[in-house]
Structure formats: structure tokens, C-alpha cells
Amino acid sequence: MASPEQISFLEVWEAGEPSPFRRPERPVGVRRSRRTRWPRMAGIVLVDFAVLVTLLAVCWKVVERAQQSSRFALSPARDVRLMGNHFVERDQVLDQLGFDDLAAWSPSSIFDVNLAEARKRAESLPWVRSAAVSRVFPHGLALRIEEQNPVAFANADGRIELVDSQGTFLPAPPKATFDFPVIHGLNAIANAAQREDLLNSYSRFIGAAHDELSGSGWQISEVYLSDGGNVRALLVQGDQTIMADFGDRDYHQRLARFTALAPRALQTYLKINSMDLRYSNEVVVDPALPDPQTGSRTQPQAMPNVHQ
């Protein structure tokens, strides 16, 4: 029997024992091909698609049942709620929406109402600036409108109509009264931007007149607008009428000048055709009555400006 010292290294290694001089071998993983994932992913997609189709079919059935249900039936006379209207009549709006024959109306579902089309129809009414239409469950319809804002009466080819700040002519509503001056000259201007500019000048003038004429007894009856920007106004106090030119600026100062100088001018001339207040240092007064001494018509006179 050989001693331990006599056993060779070759005999030990051949016996199947691990070599102390070699790293142990690690298992090598097998890399799977990506192609094996596609059947699984395709199956998931098909399942999801089937679930989606099922949900859509269920939703369609729910909507179809809802459209046929009497719970969602719309009766315009009862279920249409109109808000924001002061001048637009309810019957006028219902007619525009297609609910004109309420006696013969067969209730349908609120889901049958095209909200965008209903809004468009409502906004086509002359007095409606904007509209918003919404469903109110279970069987209501809400219509909120914003009406036009008239600022004056306007002479439109011999007809007196209302006009808003953009120059749009509006038919007078049957159950409303307005206390506005009458504007002349808008119907001769076809350009919408020019008409809006003139109405901006008018609005500034009326705002200044509200401040400066308050308590003076003078009221503005008519306003004449022109391309040059000059604002001419017919002012009335009792039996006195004066046509005054105020230009296109400084309306507060020129109206204050008018209230200060008009009484003095009427003491001198008794009756006045017009006053021109567009100059900085004087006011030109055109008397209406002839000179009692010569019998001839008095020529326009300049009066010194009054500094406030």
C-alpha cells in the first residue's frame, strides 16, 4: 500500500476530484429568442380587444335603452330652461330651436338634441350675442344666453333701429323702452371697423356728457357722426335747441365750456343755430334770429373761451 507521500497528482485528478488549481465551472444560461414572446403578447392583445368590444357593446346598449326610456324624454314647454334673457322672448328661442309647434311636439330623448347645433341656432337670433346649451339630467335642457348691449338709436335708411357698440343694427324688442339719442351717419359707412371706431367716439362723448350736463338742464337729442371724427350733437333745453360741434377729443372740457357759455350766448342772441367748440381760445356762435336794426341775418360771432 502506498503511503500518502507516494500518491501522484495525476491519480488524484483522475479520481474525479476537483482540481485546486481550476475555477469551478458556472452554469451557462440559455438565451431565449424574442420570437417566443410574440404569441403571448398577441394573446394578451386579443383578450384586451375582446374586452373592449364587449364594453363598447354594453355601452351602446345602455345608450340605446336610455334614448328609448321615458325617463329621459324631453318636453320643451316644461323642460327647456332659458336664462339671461331680458329682451329675447322664450317662444322666439323655442321656435329657433325647432320646438315651434309645442302642441304637436312628440317628446324625444335629450340625447337626441345636438348641443352644438342648438347653440348655433340660438346665436343666429339678432339679439343673442352668445349662447351655451347643456343637458340637465334626467330630461332637462338649459340654455343660457348673453344678449346684445344697445348703446343708441340709429337712423338706418329712414328707419329708427337700435345699434350696439359694434355697429350692428337691432330690431326694437316689443316690450322694452330705451332712452338713447338718435345717431345719424352710421348707415352710410359699410366698413365694420370704421363704424366701431365712430361708436367708440360716441361712447366717450356720451360718458363725458353724463358727467358734464348733469344738473344743467341740457339733454342730447341727436348725434351726427362722420368720417372726420367730428361729433355734432343737437342739445335741447326747453324750447331751445343748439347744434354744437365737439370735434374728436377733449369732450369733458368742451361740454363744460358749452354749459358755461350757452346761457351767456342766449342772453345776447335769444336764439342760436349752432356753436363750434373745437377751438382752444374761442367758441364760434351762429345766431338764428336776424339783427333787429338791419333786418339781416346776424353773422356768426366768436366768444372768448371760459377757463374752468
Image: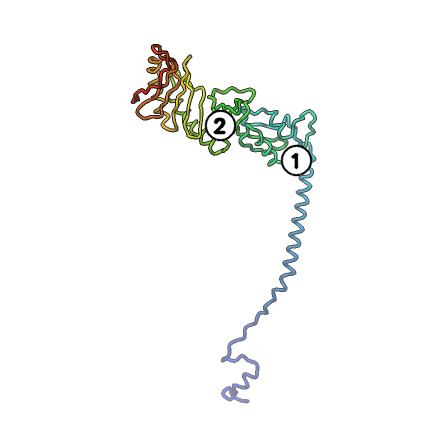
Where's residue 209, x and y in %? 40, 22
Q: Disc 1 residue type?
A: Asp
- Name the residue nearer the viewer: 67 or 99: 99
Residue position marked by numbered label 2 in the rendering: 186
**The quarter of the displayed image where residue 110 is located:** top right
Q: Residues within 10 Å of mark 1 (few under 14, many from 20)?
A: few
In the picture of the structure, the residue carrying the numbered disc 1 is: 112
Q: Identify which residue is drawn at 54% across, 32% down.
A: 130
Alpha carbon of mark 2 to alpha carbon of mark 1: how far?
A: 43 Å
Helix, strand, or loop for circle 2?
helix
Q: Nearer the viewer, residue 57 or 106?
A: 106
Other residues around mark 2 within 10 Å, as few (<14) / some (14–19) / many (≥20): many
Q: Residue at x 64, y 25 (%)?
A: 77
Amino acid type, residue under disc 2 in the picture? Leu
Relative to the observer, which residue lies in front, 16 or 72?
A: 72
Decide if residue 46 is on the left or right side of residue 168: right
Reading the chain from its start, which is encountered first: label 2 or label 1? 1
Examine the rendered structure and indicate whether residue 192 appears above or below residue 8: above
Q: Is residue 285 above or below residue 107?
A: above
Q: How many discs mark residues in the rendered view?
A: 2
Q: Is residue 93 left or right of residue 198?
A: right
Indicate whether 53 appears above or below 103: below
**Residue situated in front as seen by the camera: 135 or 35:** 135
Q: Position of residue 269 (x, y in %)?
A: 35, 13
Quarter of the figure with the N terminus? bottom right
**Quadrant location of the C terminus?**
top left
> Residue 233 appears at what percent x and percent y?
42, 22
